[in-house]
Image (spheres, rainbow, N blue to C red):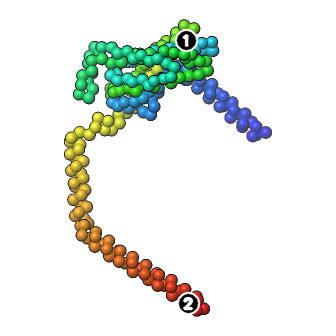
Amino acid sequence: MKVSRIAAAGTLAGTAVLALSVPAFAHVSVQPEGTAAKGGYAVVDFKVPNERDNASTTKLEVTFPTDHPLASAMPEPVNGWEIKVTKSELDKPIEMHGEKITEAVSKITWTATGDGIKAGFFQKFPVAIGQLPEDTDELVFKAIQTYSNKEVVRWIEVPQDGQEEPENPAPVLELSAAEEGHHGSSSSEEADDSEDAQAASAKTSTTEPADSSDTTARVLGVVGIVVGALGVAYGVLAGRRRTNA
């Protein structure tokens, strides 16, 4: 009786969790494959669920942020979809790898060449992006989803801290802390590393000279051979005693 009650309670709790989690998957979202660290590069997936029972998703338009422009965005080919990358001139050029970038990706459009995303399914659209900004914790990508019945859903409402999630939230990419060394080590750091290596080498040679190490190793080797020989001799004598007995 108690077991059945516990099982029923567990099932009810699981159903409640599922019910609460469903809305989180009911809109267009963006998630990194691994990490999206500030100042680095990342592959992100735009996840698009089909929310209609009588229509398929046939088009997705994702607008890239203009306040933190991304100079590079390379979409991965997706079977059954045509992809168009749109670039625009920047009001203020950005510098990347010592070069000034005057244009950045402003939008990527995926258009179905077949049935698109059918009812009850979702589709991921991977994109390699970078270089990620270092002066913000998130990037907002506004998206427009078009269905085969010409219905258009605009996922463009920016979520605000401390407020309820809007009805049609825009996909938001959370950025993690910058990874150490993503800019490469500087010449001063390399010099410090070299000095540390030299100091460690000098310390090792001072505390334990190479000749001393070789002598110690030879002595230990001889001792090992002698001990091994004594063990063999003892084993032979013990065998003879048993035989004579």
Q: Mark 1 or mark 2: which comes first in sequence?
A: 1
131 sits left or right of 46 in the view: left
Q: What residue sits 46% from the left and 81% below the top?
A: 231
Instruction: Measuring from the top left, give residue 91's x and y in whole percent.
Output: 28, 14
| Along the viewing direction, whichever of 226 and 27 lies nearer the viewer | 226
- Residue lying at the far bottom in this picture: please name it: 244
In terms of secondary structure, where does tag 1 sit?
A: strand
Q: What residue sits 26% from the left and 40% below the top?
A: 185
In terms of secondary structure, where does tag 2 sit?
A: helix
Instruction: Measuring from the top left, give residue 207's x and y in whole percent.
Output: 25, 65
- Residue 80 can be seen, yes or no: yes
- Residue lying at the far top in this picture: please name it: 150
What is the spatial separation of the Cα atoms under label 1 and label 2, in whole angstroms?
A: 95 Å
- Residue lying at the far right in this picture: please name it: 1
Q: Is residue 1 above or below residue 64?
A: below
Q: Is residue 124 above or below residue 211?
A: above
Q: Which residue is mark 2?
A: 241
Can you say which quadrant of the picture contains the N terminus?
Answer: top right
51 sits left or right of 190 in the view: right
Q: Which residue is mark 1?
A: 147
